[in-house]
Amino acid sequence: RRPPRSTPKPSSAASDVYKRQMLYDKLVKAWEEADVNLWDEIRHDEWEMLFHSDGRVVRKGDNPPEEVAERMAAINFEKSRCVYENEEILVVHQFVSFPSGDKEAVMNVSIKKDGLLWRTETGATPLDNI
């Protein structure tokens, strides 16, 4: 009789790749800590963000780091959650409060390239009296 076959263990290399490709936790940490360096690390050099509210497109490097840090510190995210993430896409929903007092429910959808955020689009719904 042959001994039972052992169950192969999941590849640690595959697990490492999976962890590198999952960016949601790094995204949250970057914004919570106003960490411009981490924010830059998770975005591809060709990263662009399209704001559906006004059609603006922002590219990585458009704003100086000091300005980005100020914006990161001034905007408050609440109830942020990862709706879905895999090696190709990240979908995030959150409630955002701005220094003006305005609040919005925001959906961010980011397509990934080379394991980094590459193309991001936002859709926002203004929230009154919440």
Image (cartoon, rainbow, N blue to C red):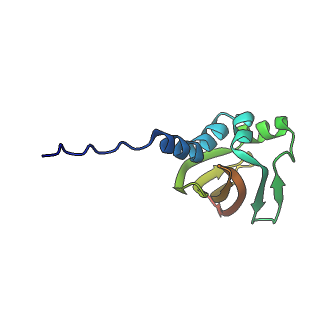
Q: Position of residue 124 (x, y in %)?
A: 67, 62
User: For this view, does 92 lie left or right of residue 10?
Assistant: right
Q: Quadrant of residue 40?
A: top right
Give the x, y percent position of residue 101: 70, 49
Q: Residue at coordinates 76% horizontally, 65% vertically from top-left?
A: 53
* Viewer-closest of 120 and 118: 118
Q: Identify the image quadrant of residue 32.
A: top right
Q: Position of residue 80 (x, y in %)?
A: 56, 49
Residue beneath the point at 34% across and 44% down: 8
Q: Residue at x 60, y 53 (%)?
A: 95
Side of 86 where 46 appears, left or right: right
Q: Quadrant of residue 52?
A: bottom right
**Taking the image as drawn, is residue 130 in sight?**
no
The residue nearer to you, when weighing 23 against 101, is 23
Q: Is residue 43 visible?
A: yes
> Residue placed farthest to the left in the image?
1
Foreground pick, 116 / 125: 116
> Which image quadrant: the C terminus?
bottom right
Q: Where's residue 13, x and y in %?
A: 50, 40
